[in-house]
Image (cartoon, rainbow, N blue to C red):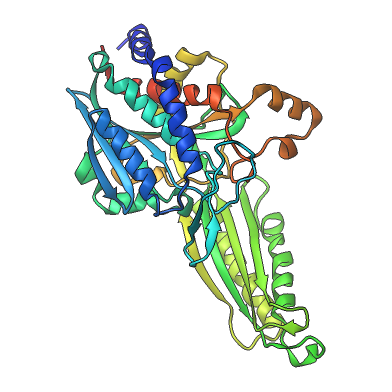
Amino acid sequence: MSDDTRRDAGTRVLDRLNEIHPRLEALYKDLHAHPELSFAETRTAGVVAADLERLGFEVTTGVGRTGVVGVLANGEGPRVFLRADFDALPVEEQTGLDYASKATGTDSEGRRVPVMHACGHDMHVACLIGALDLLAGARESWSGTVVAVFQPAEELGSGAQAMVDDGLFDRAGTPDVVLGQHVAPVPTGMIACHPGPALAATDALLVRMFGRGAHGARPEASIDPVVMAAATVMRLQTVVSREIAGGDTAVVTVGALNAGTKDNVIPDEAELKLNIRTYTPEVRATVLGAVTRIVNAEAAAAGAERDPEITPVDTFPVLVNDPAAVDRTTGALRAHFGEHTVVDMGPATGSEDCGVLATASGAPMCYWYFGGTDPAAFETATKNGTLGRDIPSNHSPHFAPLINPTLDNGVRTMTVAALAWLRTR
């Protein structure tokens, strides 16, 4: 199929974007105002399923607990999986938007927590619904099968695997390609895609360190787990700086240290929550080995009478973009948006479980980022050296993509990418 034919098909399919935009913007604001935690996305799943049925898709709900799958068969051609995640985070929104979330939910530990779409998954859903609307309304322009995968629990790293384990490919067929996208705090209109290992593997660990409690006035009667944990946090900072080669990449973050309830009570134990990012099995093994060694050594140095416990919590695999799939997809995106709009920013240390859909099926994957930030604000912050302060990133309580033109751009990227793989007429 020639590039001109694909461009013509793309133009025809995208013709209705202005028409459907108001409905998509309303959908986005509704999802943003009603976020749900991982594996609790029941309202969101219902909204998505209703839209898919309206568009004429064959719909299956409850895949991998709360996932939704829509299939639109339109003659002979490739089976193209288009994926969007739809869970939110336990974050209290501070954007001040008139559609800001006031929702709460119950987390995995039974605590009542605020809930916010602080990672843009609501934007992903609205963009995919928009692309599906356009494709369904222009079936004469393409042939093949579009499979829409609305995935739960990306934030836990287990939603994609849950859908696979629940028979996703038996229900929807085996993909010829898996396509996914993520909104990012870069200027709207910008698209970033990296071939090869594009997103890091993640290991989340819960570490419990045990001491002996005592009165704060008699530390000699204790084995202080607070000091033990603090020493461990500091020693863990040497893992990357002293055990990982300069040409390799790893991140070790202690995101939480919890111990004690009162100033004059030395507690019995302390808890650390660790997040580790790596790209290769060798570096991952080195980092995990070092963490285990340091945790145990610091406990021994403190005279702990009980060994620490190290429990894996969440695991994300490395997301690997197939180079040929990247070339094909980004070629179509460059032809539509302009040569300089699509860039390779290199691998990112964020993590995504979308790659599970590709590795489990043997299909090639292309996953990219699209910008969601006001270009003028981004340029000003760049000039002032204040990007980290002035441009909220994903997972920030202030994160909120600029709706226009981010929403339309996200619809266009997913639609054009899908047409790069479907047979166009």
Kindly give the residue lying farthest to the front in the view shown. Answer: 98
- Residue in the image at 72% along x and 24% along y: 379
Out of 264 and 220, give the one closest to the viewer. 264
Looking at the image, residue 30 lies above or below residue 232: above
Can you tell which quarter of the image residue 7 is in? top left
Q: Position of residue 259 (x, y in %)?
A: 67, 74
Number of marks = 0
Q: Position of residue 205 (x, y in %)?
A: 54, 64
Kindly give the residue lying farthest to the left in the view shown. Answer: 75
Q: Is residue 298 left or right of residue 111?
A: right
State whether residue 60 appears in this view: yes
Q: Is residue 333 left or right of residue 384?
A: left
- Residue in the image at 64% along x and 44% along y: 94
Quadrant (top left/top right/bottom left/bottom right) for the C terminus: top left
- Residue in the image at 31% along x and 21% along y: 135
Looking at the image, residue 143 lies above or below residue 366: above
